[in-house]
Image (cartoon, rainbow, N blue to C red):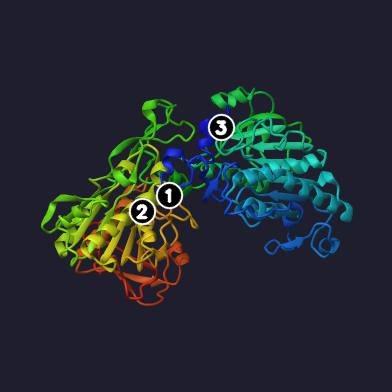
Amino acid sequence: MYKYSAVLLLLGLVAAASAASLSAPAPDSWMLIPDGNGRLHLANLNPYNMDETVPEPHFTAATDTIFRLYTRSNRDTPQVVTLNNAGSLSGSNFNAAHPTRFIIHGWNNDGFSEVNMILKDAWLDRGDFNVFTVDWGVGAQTINYPFARARVGAVGNVVSTFINFLQANTGITFASVSIAGHSLGAHAAGNAGFFQFGRLNTIFGMDPALPLFSLDSNDRLTLNDAQYVESIHTNAGLLGFDLPLGQASFYPNGGRTQPGCGVDITGACAHGRAYEFLAESIVSGGFTSVRCGSYDEILTGNCSVQGASRPMGGEPSNFGTGTEGVFTLSTLVANMKAATVILSVLGLVALGSAAPVESNHPWALIPDGNGRLRLINVNPYDVPKGDNEVEPLFDPLTDVVFRLYTRRNPVHPQVIRWNDAGSVSGSNFNPAHPTRFLIHGFLEGEDASLHWAIKDHFIRVGEFNIVNVDWGAGSQTINYIAARNRVGAVGEVISRMINTIVSATGASRNNINLIGHSLGAHVAANAGKHQNGQLNTIIGLDPAGPLFSNGQADLFGANDAQYTEAIFTNAGLLGFDQPLAHANFYPNGGRSQPGCILDVAGICAHNRVNNFYAESVSSSVGFRSTRCANHAEILQGRCTPSGANANMGGEPSNRGRGVNGVYFLTTNSNSPFAQG
């Protein structure tokens, strides 16, 4: 049951072959893992191969775990209650007459993570409760997942000790206390209940973590950890434990994937959906579930009704109602944005175009950046098994191709190589002319629309060295995760090419710009990082959103060049949502684009940025934009003019003009798009 593939995909992760980097750690030690908020982190999964130069921070559960109390009297400003400090308790708003609820977060989270805030608000909306968030972030926020996993027992123990402290000082009954834990927090909750001898009222295990847990683990959540234990499985077999763990185990929508999460490659969306379901059930109920004959029926999707239906979650819980067994239910898509965000991972699936080849087969028809349909593996539960299905090896040092175009050879490129200075000096490259690198995205290659559209506009307006970067050997893959994780390695090779150009021709880095679309925007940024920000300009054309989040080392950054500009045309779906650059332009609000009718998958809007930028290079009108006060205004569809206007894109770029912040503009629905 616990396949090696499940470990490779730990939290929807990266197969070792896909984590290609020119200077990467051992492939069996590091993977990208989403935390409880869906942010991806590079985590060490091998407890026997830790980096001794980065010592693990010391964590003592008894002193490092923080208990924050929220009540209706202080629902937004928590009061810290310190274990064994009776004064901190008596001086708080704790009311022994009200039920007490604990919330325990998971890996890489802390006391202010989304799971805490959503559930805290749900209980306080429901009624008068003492709600404690258990902040064990000092132990959970570590790159070494095994260390965090090993701490669930100690965290559970200190939560149990804290409950005893409450009882001794306020006289509460243990039957008035319930705990809700998410992921690793579910097992911590189970341990708290174990140390309480099973006398607490209820424990909710929200998609209890699977990686490094098994039925034999003595510190996992069990059905005897409270008077009533309920497990809610939303990403079973990937991030979450697959087998029933509670007296009652609920599998909404089959328990593996969730409506609105689409092609949830990392599982982060489905994994987090568990606490969203519980929060909604606390406030409004409504999750009526059918009791099935066995867990096997859950797996096969064939539920023979056995016994009475029961609600999932809720407040009060099912304690005392005789609820036990395995249950299934269907839910609605929570919000269409979430449905299409992950459903269409970077050029990916439109509701209409993602036609499965077979109903139980992990393949779908996916449009690439040029709108052509490709067969893509979109099932993170089904990794390649046959020798002929293994992810092709990609070596960026040899597989990235650089093609040079100039006015002397506008149609037939000359191949230049980073490790062959003669290929540059013997070409039409002219160091007196500006140099522009064009970098495509996922599923594209030599014939990417980005290359041809923008290249022709540059050559039309002046003398340029145009270098098309073809990393199709790494981007044209059934495994999006593999392509995403190659942006750093491809960026490093581009940096080497730049170094060769500079040394072979005397060209100035101040005369070099990089333009990248989607994944290519992050590739460009990584090249800029390796150049220590010395390049003139980097333009990010709708930088890819899926599997990227703030704080990642390989994310497009403002300081990757002297001037960086991001243009957002499908923000929040295929494109990144938040400002990334010195100047951030949101044409038509940045999410959908005029002329892109019924653009469910976002392909049209995602690619429209290439048309905008290409036109900006040669336009005499220009894409005049208004500087707004902040990004929040962009999201709200309004813009308070704040500072000087600026042009989006253009040649030369805005470098040296003091252009920064967020900008709004409108365009025409067809070419010419610029309104001046």
Question: Is there a contact, CB below 8 Å, between mark 1 and mark 2?
Answer: yes
Mark 2 neighbour class, 10 Å CA radius: few under 14, some 14 to 19, many 20 or more: many
Question: Residue 213: x, y in percent?
Answer: 64, 35
Q: Which residue is mark 2?
A: 492
Q: Is residue 392 above or below residue 19?
A: above
- Name the residue type under label 2: Glu
Please name the residue that numbered disc 1 is placed on. 23
Disc 1 marks a residue whose amino acid type is Ser
Between the C-alphas of marks 1 and 3, the distance is 41 Å
Tag shown at residue 40: none
> What's the residue type where badge 3 is placed?
Gly
For mark 2, give the secondary structure: helix
Quarter of the view holding residue 453 = bottom left
Q: In this rendering, which labeled residue sits more in front, label 3 or label 2?
A: 2
Residue 673 visible here: no
Report whether 7 appears left or right of 386: right
Residue named by callout 3:
254
Quarter of the image where the N terminus is located: top right
For the residues labelled 3 and 2, the Cα–Cα distance comes to 43 Å
Q: Residue furthest bottom?
A: 643
Q: Earlier in the sequence, mark 1 or mark 2?
A: 1
